Amino acid sequence: DAKTTQPPSMDCAEGRAANLPCNHSTISGNEYVYWYRQIHSQGPQYIIHGLKNNETNEMASLIITEDRKSSTLILPHATLRDTAVYYCIVRAIHSQGGSEKLVFGKGTKLTVNP
Amino acid sequence: ETGVTQTPRHLVMGMTNKKSLKCEQHLGHNAMYWYKQSAKKPLELMFVYSLEERVENNSVPSRFSPECPNSSHLFLHLHTLQPEDSALYLCASSQDIQGYYGYTFGSGTRLTVV
Protein backbone atom coordinates (compact mmCIF):
# COMPACT_ATOMS: atom_id res chain seq x y z
CA ASP A 1 0.00 0.00 0.00
CA ALA A 2 1.27 3.44 -0.90
CA LYS A 3 1.99 5.60 2.11
CA THR A 4 1.69 8.85 0.18
CA THR A 5 -0.61 10.37 -2.42
CA GLN A 6 0.60 12.99 -4.86
CA PRO A 7 -1.00 14.57 -7.92
CA PRO A 8 0.46 13.03 -11.07
CA SER A 9 1.34 16.36 -12.64
CA MET A 10 1.48 20.10 -12.01
CA ASP A 11 2.47 23.20 -13.93
CA CYS A 12 4.11 26.33 -12.66
CA ALA A 13 5.19 29.59 -14.26
CA GLU A 14 8.87 30.45 -14.15
CA GLY A 15 9.67 32.77 -11.28
CA ARG A 16 6.56 31.86 -9.31
CA ALA A 17 6.41 29.63 -6.27
CA ALA A 18 5.74 25.95 -6.90
CA ASN A 19 3.70 24.31 -4.15
CA LEU A 20 3.70 20.53 -4.35
CA PRO A 21 1.22 18.74 -2.06
CA CYS A 22 1.52 15.32 -0.50
CA ASN A 23 -1.01 13.39 1.56
CA HIS A 24 0.20 10.89 4.13
CA SER A 25 -2.84 10.39 6.31
CA THR A 26 -1.60 7.14 7.89
CA ILE A 27 1.78 8.50 8.95
CA SER A 28 2.99 7.22 12.32
CA GLY A 29 5.04 8.89 15.02
CA ASN A 30 8.50 7.73 13.94
CA GLU A 31 7.99 8.35 10.23
CA TYR A 32 9.71 11.23 8.52
CA VAL A 33 8.66 12.97 5.32
CA TYR A 34 11.38 13.04 2.68
CA TRP A 35 11.34 14.81 -0.66
CA TYR A 36 13.46 13.90 -3.65
CA ARG A 37 13.34 14.98 -7.25
CA GLN A 38 14.49 13.33 -10.46
CA ILE A 39 15.39 15.38 -13.46
CA HIS A 40 15.01 13.51 -16.73
CA SER A 41 17.65 10.79 -17.25
CA GLN A 42 19.41 11.57 -13.97
CA GLY A 43 19.41 9.93 -10.57
CA PRO A 44 17.09 11.21 -7.84
CA GLN A 45 18.32 14.14 -5.77
CA TYR A 46 17.60 14.62 -2.08
CA ILE A 47 15.81 17.91 -1.38
CA ILE A 48 14.67 18.10 2.23
CA HIS A 49 13.11 16.10 5.06
CA GLY A 50 11.21 16.75 8.27
CA LEU A 51 9.35 15.13 11.13
CA LYS A 52 6.85 17.67 12.38
CA ASN A 53 8.41 21.11 12.25
CA ASN A 54 8.64 23.16 9.09
CA GLU A 55 12.04 22.99 7.46
CA THR A 56 13.91 25.23 5.04
CA ASN A 57 17.17 24.86 3.18
CA GLU A 58 18.77 26.40 0.13
CA MET A 59 16.63 24.36 -2.22
CA ALA A 60 13.14 24.43 -0.75
CA SER A 61 10.81 24.72 2.22
CA LEU A 62 8.79 21.90 3.71
CA ILE A 63 5.54 22.69 5.45
CA ILE A 64 4.02 19.86 7.51
CA THR A 65 0.52 20.23 8.89
CA GLU A 66 0.05 20.06 12.64
CA ASP A 67 -1.66 16.66 12.43
CA ARG A 68 1.17 15.52 10.10
CA LYS A 69 -1.31 14.04 7.64
CA SER A 70 -0.12 16.17 4.77
CA SER A 71 2.78 18.32 3.68
CA THR A 72 3.74 20.80 0.99
CA LEU A 73 7.07 21.25 -0.69
CA ILE A 74 7.63 24.85 -1.74
CA LEU A 75 10.10 25.95 -4.39
CA PRO A 76 9.99 29.72 -3.80
CA HIS A 77 11.07 30.89 -7.26
CA ALA A 78 10.79 28.07 -9.75
CA THR A 79 13.15 27.98 -12.71
CA LEU A 80 13.09 25.90 -15.88
CA ARG A 81 15.75 23.66 -14.30
CA ASP A 82 13.26 22.70 -11.59
CA THR A 83 11.24 20.72 -14.13
CA ALA A 84 11.40 17.19 -12.72
CA VAL A 85 9.46 14.42 -11.02
CA TYR A 86 9.11 15.18 -7.31
CA TYR A 87 8.76 12.29 -4.88
CA CYS A 88 7.27 12.54 -1.41
CA ILE A 89 8.38 9.57 0.68
CA VAL A 90 7.43 8.61 4.20
CA ARG A 91 9.86 6.38 6.02
CA ALA A 92 10.49 5.34 9.58
CA ILE A 93 13.78 6.08 11.30
CA HIS A 94 14.28 3.89 14.33
CA SER A 95 16.14 5.34 17.28
CA GLN A 96 17.95 2.08 17.93
CA GLY A 97 19.42 1.98 14.44
CA GLY A 98 18.07 0.71 11.18
CA SER A 99 15.29 2.28 9.24
CA GLU A 100 12.91 1.64 6.43
CA LYS A 101 14.53 1.76 3.07
CA LEU A 102 13.75 4.51 0.60
CA VAL A 103 10.73 3.38 -1.43
CA PHE A 104 9.67 5.54 -4.36
CA GLY A 105 6.15 5.99 -5.68
CA LYS A 106 5.11 7.66 -8.92
CA GLY A 107 5.65 11.23 -7.75
CA THR A 108 4.45 14.50 -9.27
CA LYS A 109 5.72 15.60 -12.65
CA LEU A 110 6.33 19.33 -12.26
CA THR A 111 6.68 21.34 -15.44
CA VAL A 112 7.97 24.88 -15.11
CA ASN A 113 6.86 26.98 -18.06
CA PRO A 114 8.60 30.08 -19.40
CA GLU B 1 28.62 15.57 -9.95
CA THR B 2 26.97 14.13 -6.88
CA GLY B 3 29.91 12.25 -5.39
CA VAL B 4 28.53 8.92 -6.57
CA THR B 5 30.00 7.87 -9.91
CA GLN B 6 28.56 5.11 -12.06
CA THR B 7 30.21 3.53 -15.06
CA PRO B 8 29.48 2.95 -17.81
CA ARG B 9 26.76 5.52 -18.48
CA HIS B 10 25.33 3.42 -21.29
CA LEU B 11 25.63 -0.30 -21.96
CA VAL B 12 24.24 -2.51 -24.70
CA MET B 13 24.63 -6.23 -24.17
CA GLY B 14 23.41 -9.44 -25.69
CA MET B 15 21.48 -11.99 -23.68
CA THR B 16 24.46 -14.31 -23.46
CA ASN B 17 26.98 -11.68 -22.41
CA LYS B 18 28.47 -11.10 -18.99
CA LYS B 19 29.00 -7.50 -17.94
CA SER B 20 29.45 -5.53 -14.75
CA LEU B 21 28.19 -2.16 -13.59
CA LYS B 22 30.42 -0.17 -11.30
CA CYS B 23 29.56 2.36 -8.62
CA GLU B 24 32.07 4.41 -6.64
CA GLN B 25 31.59 6.92 -3.86
CA HIS B 26 34.13 8.96 -1.94
CA LEU B 27 31.68 10.54 0.46
CA GLY B 28 32.71 8.37 3.38
CA HIS B 29 29.33 6.68 3.36
CA ASN B 30 28.86 3.22 4.86
CA ALA B 31 25.71 2.06 3.08
CA MET B 32 25.20 1.50 -0.63
CA TYR B 33 22.20 0.53 -2.73
CA TRP B 34 21.22 -0.69 -6.18
CA TYR B 35 17.93 0.46 -7.68
CA LYS B 36 16.31 -0.42 -11.00
CA GLN B 37 14.10 2.02 -12.91
CA SER B 38 12.19 0.53 -15.83
CA ALA B 39 10.31 2.73 -18.26
CA LYS B 40 7.21 4.28 -16.73
CA LYS B 41 7.65 2.37 -13.44
CA PRO B 42 8.75 3.59 -10.02
CA LEU B 43 12.27 2.92 -8.82
CA GLU B 44 12.66 -0.57 -7.39
CA LEU B 45 15.14 -1.31 -4.63
CA MET B 46 17.28 -4.31 -5.54
CA PHE B 47 20.09 -4.66 -3.02
CA VAL B 48 21.29 -2.98 0.16
CA TYR B 49 24.78 -3.12 1.62
CA SER B 50 25.87 -1.85 5.01
CA LEU B 51 29.57 -1.88 5.88
CA GLU B 52 30.17 -4.20 2.91
CA GLU B 53 27.63 -6.72 4.13
CA ARG B 54 24.50 -7.40 2.12
CA VAL B 55 21.52 -6.69 4.34
CA GLU B 56 18.70 -6.86 1.84
CA ASN B 57 17.96 -8.68 -1.38
CA ASN B 58 14.53 -7.85 -2.71
CA SER B 59 13.68 -11.06 -4.60
CA VAL B 60 16.04 -10.18 -7.39
CA PRO B 61 16.75 -12.93 -9.98
CA SER B 62 20.10 -14.63 -9.66
CA ARG B 63 21.20 -13.30 -13.03
CA PHE B 64 21.93 -10.10 -11.07
CA SER B 65 24.82 -10.58 -8.66
CA PRO B 66 26.01 -7.71 -6.45
CA GLU B 67 29.45 -7.33 -4.95
CA CYS B 68 30.72 -4.84 -2.41
CA PRO B 69 34.49 -5.27 -1.94
CA ASN B 70 34.79 -2.19 0.27
CA SER B 71 32.62 0.65 1.48
CA SER B 72 33.54 2.85 -1.50
CA HIS B 73 32.76 0.44 -4.31
CA LEU B 74 29.72 -1.49 -5.41
CA PHE B 75 29.35 -3.70 -8.45
CA LEU B 76 26.40 -5.33 -10.16
CA HIS B 77 27.43 -8.35 -12.20
CA LEU B 78 25.07 -9.21 -15.04
CA HIS B 79 24.73 -12.61 -16.70
CA THR B 80 22.22 -14.07 -19.12
CA LEU B 81 19.89 -11.11 -18.98
CA GLN B 82 16.52 -10.81 -20.67
CA PRO B 83 15.25 -7.92 -22.80
CA GLU B 84 12.87 -6.95 -19.96
CA ASP B 85 15.94 -6.24 -17.81
CA SER B 86 16.60 -3.19 -19.94
CA ALA B 87 16.36 -0.24 -17.56
CA LEU B 88 18.22 2.54 -15.81
CA TYR B 89 20.27 1.07 -12.97
CA LEU B 90 20.95 3.52 -10.19
CA CYS B 91 23.44 3.31 -7.38
CA ALA B 92 23.02 5.28 -4.17
CA SER B 93 24.86 5.70 -0.90
CA SER B 94 24.01 7.04 2.53
CA GLN B 95 26.02 7.96 5.59
CA ASP B 96 24.82 4.83 7.34
CA ILE B 97 22.02 2.30 7.02
CA GLN B 98 19.63 4.70 8.77
CA GLY B 99 19.97 7.14 5.91
CA TYR B 100 18.68 10.01 8.05
CA TYR B 101 20.46 12.65 5.96
CA GLY B 102 19.19 11.18 2.73
CA TYR B 103 20.60 9.07 -0.05
CA THR B 104 23.00 10.35 -2.70
CA PHE B 105 22.37 8.88 -6.12
CA GLY B 106 24.60 8.46 -9.12
CA SER B 107 23.48 9.32 -12.63
CA GLY B 108 22.81 5.70 -13.48
CA THR B 109 23.74 3.22 -16.16
CA ARG B 110 21.28 2.95 -19.02
CA LEU B 111 21.24 -0.76 -19.89
CA THR B 112 19.81 -2.18 -23.09
CA VAL B 113 19.59 -5.95 -23.49
CA VAL B 114 19.30 -7.11 -27.09
Image: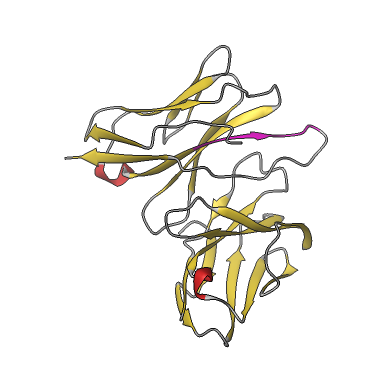
Residue A25 vs A33, above or below: the answer is above
Q: Residue at x 54, y 83 (%)?
A: B15
Could one spot residue B51 in this view of the protein? no
Could one spot residue B76 in this view of the protein? yes
Residue at the far top in the pictured view:
A66
Q: Is residue A6 left or right of residue B105?
A: left
Does the stretch in magenta take in A66?
Answer: no
Question: Bounds of the magenta span?
Answer: A88-95
Does the stretch in magenta take in A93?
Answer: yes
Q: Which residue is drawn at 25% across and 33% down?
A: A12
* Colouring mode (rainbow / by chain / secondary structure / one colour): secondary structure
Position of the N terminus of chain B by quadrant:
bottom left
Q: Which residue is drawn at 54% across and 31% down?
A: A4
Foreground: B15 or A111? B15
Q: Is residue B27 left or right of residue B106?
A: right
- Residue A50 is situated, as x and y percent measured from the top left of the image, at 57, 27
Residue at the far left in the pictured view:
A114
Residue at the far bottom in the pictured view:
B16
- Residue A33 is situated, as x and y percent measured from the top left of the image, at 57, 30
- Residue A39 is situated, as x and y percent measured from the top left of the image, at 38, 51
Q: Which residue is drawn at 59% across and 43% down?
A: B102
Foreground: A43 or A2? A2
